Image: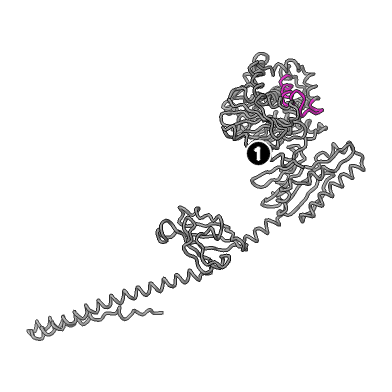
Amino acid sequence: MEKKTPLFLKDDSFIYFVVIVLLIIIFIIEGMFIYAASAGLVLVIITAFTLRKQILRNKELKNYVINYTKNLENLSINSFYYSPLPICIIGLNGKMFWFNNKFKELLSGDSDVIENIEEFVGGFPSKSMDGNKEGTISNIEVPETGRSFNVLYYELEEGRFGEGRSYVCYWNENTAFITLKNKYNDERPITMLIQIDNYEEISEKLELGEKSSMTAQTEKILNNYAAEMNGFVLKYDNYKFLMIIENKYLETLEAKKFSMLDDVKSIRGTNDFNFTLSIGTGAMAKNLTQLMDYSKGALDVALGRGGDQAVVKRINSVKFYGGKSKAVEKRTKVRARIISYALRQIIDQSSNVIIMGHRVGDMDSLGSAIGIYSIAKSRGKKSYIVLNNVNHALKNMYERMKKEESHYIESIITTEKALELSDQNTLIVVLDTHRKSYTEAPELIDQIDKVVLIDHHRRSEEYIENTLLDYIEPYASSTCELVAELIQYMEEHIKLTKFEADALMAGIVVDTNSFTFKTGIRTFEAAAFLKRRGADNVEVKELFNESIEFMKKKTEIIERSEIVFDDVAVSYIDETTEDSNVAAAQSADELLTIKDVNMSFVLVRNKEYINISGRSVGDMNVQVILEYLGGGGHLNMAGAQVYTTDMEEAKAKLYEAIAQYKKEIKP
């Protein structure tokens, strides 16, 4: 369509001006001066008229532009006000400057005016817009309406609405998407692998009919739970089940701490025997294959922590529920034989062996390292023990090592040396811990691909993945017990020296508190084996001898202890010394001898953190308590590190963890 130029913009005066000038020139040339003067007069008149017309035209043009702009502004305002999107203008402090008709419809009640966005949506993150020219605030829920919005905002020119910045906000509704997303998340499947973890042990003690009855009752409990959660249970072995439920019920299960664990334990057989469950739950996976992998991994963790618990694994988290019972000691030694054979094969295929325990080593970590060293030596492999510092707990063993087995001293190396000695065929054996961050040299695990893991602690969320071989048995008293069993089942006879036998025995003694805690049949069998190989109880005891100053220090720790929560003894060491951690552990053991004390904790100051040693008797689970603080261990013996230098803060966190545990176990 052809656009027309407004009349006041058209100007034809120029044509007359040119014609008259030409006539004046002709008149002058022809000598017709009167006519030339007359034409000049006409020219002046036309010029004056043209100038006047130009002034009027400029005035009209200005009025036209003003009117046109007003029309645009009115159109813009109408577009904003009657926009199908809710729109408002706010300041960084949430002050409401303006809102349109659609936004007004969102306001609850009859109020047409609100002074601050907080009156509309409590907690609206207006401060998050500071420093951004534009952006999006996702999933803002409008109270009492059930509607959700994504808020797109743009910064306006500063000062347009008073001092400071202001933003125009477009409310784009995404309620349908959120509803669909929630429905999808609620109905997506959750897989639970469930296993009666002491089925074989209990079965030996029950008659066939009673065993079948207890199994049937267990299956009935699981079916009832599945029916309540729109799911089902599939039994695929005598004592193994697969349960699939909807995701929306998982939160309820977690809130009830997987109450099915206690329901199954309430089923009692002859001599008060009962089943316990291990449950591996996979959630929020990308597909069904990954979901089953999560469940299998979670079940492995539950079993690795001693059973009688549920583990929920999501893509970025692992949570634990239950685990209040003692780990069931396995009577079969088949696994020990298999692990022993596999370890021998792996060592044979390695160029050298590097052995390390946890940082701030103890008799169990060093004793088991000496045991693995003897195995590698028997296979003709050069092996090394990574030990950066000889702390107070290892001092006596180290001194004896220098006297009786000086070749060990040459094999004890630092982290730097270990990194130099490692190659693509090096094997690293990690002992007495399964946490990479707790090892003597975490960087070695990053550099060496072939990793063997041997530990007796209940498995935690942090775990060394992709190992060639892992042997985690939380029922065992110590890592030295496990290593002693492996030595027994090596096909070729391994000749332990008296020092090596004493070192392994010392590890068992320290972790059982002289055969008091976590001592099973296989603990005594391992001790008997070491006795036959020359272990001497008197010389082992000498490895724990302490100075009079150290004994006085323990007495002071016990003296400053206090009783909290009726049955918990707590004390502390506020100075940082070489022997503080050992004194804390031994003092925690001593505090349990106080009448009516079921748990004890001793806090000790280190350079960057405060270490906590926990001990318990009976069914009191210090492992669960210290896991709240990022630690771990066993039901009766555990530890944690609280990263603060404030002793009172660390004590407060410990008390909070104890209170939480007491609340959860309260019937």
Answer with the quarter of the image where residue 33 lies. bottom left
Q: Is residue 100 above or below residue 230?
A: below
Residue 553 lies in quadrant: top right
**Residue 396 within the segment the image draws in magenta:** no
- Depth check, front residue: 229 or 430: 229
Q: Which residue is mark 1?
A: 656
Residue shown at the point (49%, 65%) measured from the top left: 99
| Left or right: residue 13 compared with residue 613 | left
Circle 1 Cα neighbour tier, 10 Å, few/some/many (<14 / 14–19 / ≥20): some
State the predominant SS element of the stretch in magenta. Answer: helix
Q: In this rendering, does residue 454 appear at all?
A: no
Three-letter code for the amino acid on which mark 1 is drawn: Glu
Compared across the picture, whether 157 is left or right of 376 comes to: left
Which quarter of the image is occupied by the N terminus? bottom left
Measured as percent of width and height from the top left, residue 518 is found at 77, 29
How far across and how far down the image is residue 76, in percent? 44, 70
Q: Is residue 505 magenta?
A: yes
Look at the numbered disc 1 and give the secondary structure of its residue: helix
Residue 410 visible in the snapshot: yes
Quarter of the image that includes the C terminus: top right
The residue furthest top is 403
Q: Is residue 10 left or right of residue 361?
A: left
The segment highlighted magenta reads: 502-523
Query: x, y percentage for residue 376?
Result: 70, 24
Q: Is residue 117 above or below residue 538?
A: below
